[in-house]
């Protein structure tokens, strides 16, 4: 986690968290849409990597905003994606 006591450092941290959050939102929508329209399979690497990265992005925002229910949900989502990726190996 980025830690800073300067106003500039705090602003950079806030912007970074927002960027990760927006990426997370886009990734989960792309993953769901791609599976729904048959562009990718839910048992493949692209889907699982999108799920993992989206949960990380959304989880960062949830922790940053102290939305702990959402943060825990994303931790579970991360764990599921990691296990699924390991099973694909």
Image: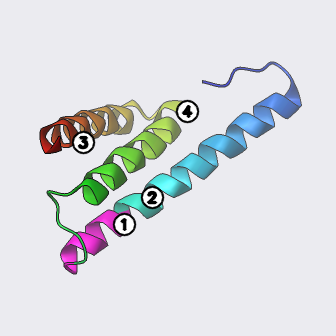
- Judge left or right: residue 3 versus residue 64: right
* x then y, percent, for residue 83: 18, 35
Against 84, residue 47 (above or below) is: below
Residue at point 46% right, 53% down?
A: 24
Label 1 – label 2 distance at C-alpha: 6 Å
Disc 4 is placed on an element classified as helix
- Judge left or right: residue 11 versus residue 65: right
Q: Please provide the residue range marked out in magenta.
A: 29-38
Comes first in the chain, label 2 or label 4? 2
Against 3, residue 12 (above or below) is: below
Disc 1 is placed on an element classified as helix
Point out the frontmost of discs 2 and 4.
Answer: 2
Instruction: Report which residue position mark 4 lands on.
Output: 64
Label 3 – label 2 distance at C-alpha: 16 Å
Disc 3 is placed on an element classified as helix
Label 4 CA crowd tier, 10 Å (few <14, some 14–19, many 20+): some
Instruction: Report which residue position mark 3 lands on.
Output: 81
Comes first in the chain, label 1 or label 3? 1
Point out the frontmost of discs 1 and 3.
Answer: 3
Against 69, residue 41 (above or below) is: below
Q: Quadrant of the C terminus?
A: top left
Comes first in the chain, label 3 or label 2? 2
Point out the frontmost of discs 1 and 4.
Answer: 1
- Mark 1 and mark 2 in contact? Answer it, CB < 8 Å: yes
Residue at point 14% right, 57% down?
A: 43
Label 1 CA crowd tier, 10 Å (few <14, some 14–19, many 20+): some
Q: Quadrant of the N terminus?
A: top right
Comes first in the chain, label 4 or label 3? 4
Q: Which mark is residue 29?
A: 1
Instruction: Report which residue position mark 2 lands on.
Output: 25
Label 2 – label 4 distance at C-alpha: 16 Å
Label 1 – label 4 distance at C-alpha: 22 Å
């Amino acid at each position: 986690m980025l830690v800073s006591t300067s106003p500039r450092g705090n602003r950079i941290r806030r912007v970074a968290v927002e960027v990760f959050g927006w990426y997370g939102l886009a990734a989960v929508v792309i993953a769901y849409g791609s599976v729904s329209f048959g562009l990718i399979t839910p048992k493949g690497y692209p889907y699982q990597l999108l799920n993992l990265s989206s949960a990380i992005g959304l989880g960062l925002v949830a922790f940053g905003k102290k939305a702990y229910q959402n943060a825990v949900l994303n931790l579970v989502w991360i764990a599921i994606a990691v296990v699924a990726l390991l099973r694909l190996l």
